[in-house]
Amino acid sequence: ERLARFEAGMVPPARMQAFLQGLLARGGAVEVIGLKTLPVTLVGAPAGDKTEAAAQGSATAAKDKPSAPGSEDGIYQHGIEIRLAGSYNGLLNYLAELERMPQRVMWNSISLTVEKHPRNVMVLRVYTLSLDRNWLVV
């Protein structure tokens, strides 16, 4: 029950891209220069353990997997790497807005480089958690 309540507070995986782009529409001071879906991972699984999403395109992996999609129990991490460009303050405001949203996403990696003052490029990895391993492809 606690897990279901926690999941209800997270952005659903299918809405992740729209959620992040909606934040950008509000500010306008930040530009998206790249968006990439990360492989779905099972929370708590060994680092070398691949999921169905990471093995897409591999006929052998699909053939060896007897269970139906979504049938494994567990908590899945669905992530997106987003590359943004803008001023330092614009990028900082984007992060602050992301943290204030009522539906949550988590982030586990961020890097910032200066292309040419005042333009900065930020690479941010955000993710949501779900009991469903099905994930969208961006």
Image (cartoon, rainbow, N blue to C red):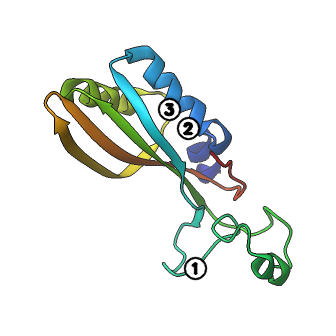
- Is 136 left or right of 2, judged from the image as shown? right
Q: What residue type is labelled 1?
A: Asp
For the residues bearing labels 2 and 3, Cβ distance under 8 angstroms: no
Q: For mark 2, does the 10 Å Cα neighbourhood hold few (<14), some (14 to 19), or many (20 or more) residues? A: some
Q: Position of residue 36 (x, y in %)?
A: 52, 49
| Residue that label 1 marks | 49
The C terminus - image quarter: top right
Q: How far across and how far down the image is residue 70, in percent?
A: 78, 61
SS type, badge 1: loop
Q: What residue type is labelled 3?
A: Leu
Q: How would you rate the neighbour count of disc 1 (Cα within 10 Å): few for under 14, some for 14-19, many for 20 or more?
A: few
Decide which of tag 1 and tag 2 comes sooner along the chain. Answer: 2
Label at residue 96: none
What kind of element bears circle 2? helix
Q: Is mark 3 on a helix, strand or loop?
A: helix
Q: Left or right? Give the position of 66 relative to 27.
A: right
- Residue picked out by circle 3: 20
Residue designated by label 2? 9
Identity of the residue furthest to the left in this view: 117
